[in-house]
Image (spheres, grey):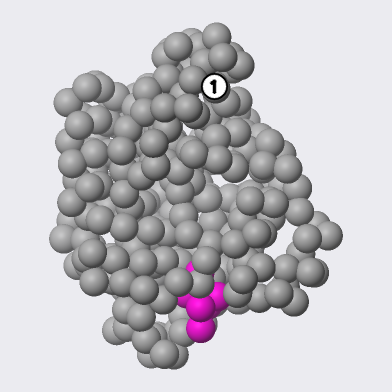
């Protein structure tokens, strides 16, 4: 794989895992497209200073707004003939029960619906890569989901049945489900799709403190620097050892088991179809 010719698009690059992933890939002389709703000018300057790689561009993207996602995808398609890797890193760890501008639960939209729409819109650019890859950052918290069949009608709304943290866990389960579904639907293409649990970092642990002080005290003992988590993301984005691997969930560089409900193909197709209905976009 020619490291000098690869182009990666990463969402959520202001800090933490996203920033470190961009830094590590820039150090390999990749072209890095960084997307965030926050200003990334200082971030870009920092990466260029540390890597001497000037092939870094910044873009505005708000995953809580479908219009922003569509405009962003249009702009990327206008400026680029292909992308090689899409890393869906951006997300909300917080247990916010507020609504997005599109009237969905904001955590569900930023963590699940937004990345789903973005990936769907950029699939054509990935098909123009010699070997396209899609990477979703998920969480082992998906095993704590309460996303059962009776919840499906209210999946994306701010309803009382779902606690704040369960909203996050459910969104991470959805990441796993769409990973499997994208892999299945793209199996005859040159694109692979995998997801990973990057571990608990200090940046997202601080967000947890205000919602669950007890969990904060327990988990702070097992946090790791974002550089360590980013290295696992880079592994899925760049390693030759996973070139033909698709539809898998990784933990510590190894394929791991997903929650049992992901084996229910009928259920997973319902989640997929509902996501299509919510974003108004059908994956061909």
> How many residues crowd around disc 1 within 10 Å: few (fewer than 14), some, or many (20 or more)?
many
In x, y percent, where is residue 222? 80, 57
**Residue 37 falls left or right of residue 195:** left
Q: Does the magenta portion include 123?
A: no
Residue at the right extreme of this rendering: 221
- Magenta span of residues: 163-168
In x, y percent, where is residue 195? 53, 50
Task: Please tell me whether residue 253 is drawn above or below residue 48 in the rendered image.
Answer: below
The residue that appears at 52% across and 66% down in the rendered structure is 94
The residue that appears at 73% across and 43% down in the rendered structure is 225
**Residue 283 falls left or right of residue 51:** left
In x, y percent, where is residue 24? 60, 25
Q: Nearer the viewer, residue 194 or 114?
A: 114
Q: Quick check: can you spot residue 232?
A: no
Residue ID for mark 1:
47
In x, y percent, where is residue 208? 63, 66
Q: Nearer the viewer, residue 140 or 222?
A: 222
**Residue 13 falls left or right of residue 209:** left
What kind of element bears circle 1? helix
Task: Please tell me whether residue 261 is drawn above or below residue 23 in the rendered image.
Answer: below
Q: Quick check: can you spot residue 104?
A: yes
Task: Please tell me whether residue 205 is drawn above or below residue 166 in the rendered image.
Answer: above
Q: Nearer the viewer, residue 127 or 41?
A: 41
């Amino acid at each position: 794989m020619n490291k000098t010719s690869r182009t990666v698009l990463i969402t959520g690059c202001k800090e933490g895992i996203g920033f470190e992933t961009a830094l590590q890939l820039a150090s390999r002389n990749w072209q890095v497209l960084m997307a965030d709703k926050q200003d990334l000018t200082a971030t870009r300057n920092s990466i260029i200073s540390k890597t001497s790689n000037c092939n870094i561009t910044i873009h505005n993207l708000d995953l809580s707004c479908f219009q922003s996602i569509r405009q962003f995808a249009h702009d990327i398609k206008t400026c680029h003939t292909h992308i090689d890797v899409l890393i869906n890193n951006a997300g909300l760890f917080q247990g916010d029960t507020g609504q997005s501008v599109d009237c969905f639960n904001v955590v569900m939209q930023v963590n699940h619906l937004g990345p789903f729409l973005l990936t769907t819109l950029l699939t054509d650019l990935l098909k123009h890569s010699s070997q396209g890859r899609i990477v979703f950052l998920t969480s082992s918290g998906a095993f704590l989901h309460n996303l059962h069949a009776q919840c499906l009608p209210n999946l994306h709304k701010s309803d009382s049945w779902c606690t704040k943290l369960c909203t996050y866990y459910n969104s991470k389960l959805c990441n796993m489900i769409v990973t499997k579904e994208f892999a299945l639907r793209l199996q005859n293409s040159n694109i692979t799709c995998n997801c990973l649990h990057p571990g608990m970092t200090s940046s997202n642990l601080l967000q947890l403190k205000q919602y669950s002080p007890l969990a904060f005290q327990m988990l702070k003992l097992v946090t790791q620097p974002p550089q360590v988590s980013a290295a696992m993301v880079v592994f899925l984005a760049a390693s030759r050892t996973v070139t033909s691997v698709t539809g898998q969930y990784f933990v510590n560089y190894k394929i791991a088991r997903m929650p049992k409900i992901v084996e229910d193909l009928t259920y997973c197709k319902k989640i997929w179809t509902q996501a299509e209905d919510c974003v108004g976009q059908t994956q061909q």
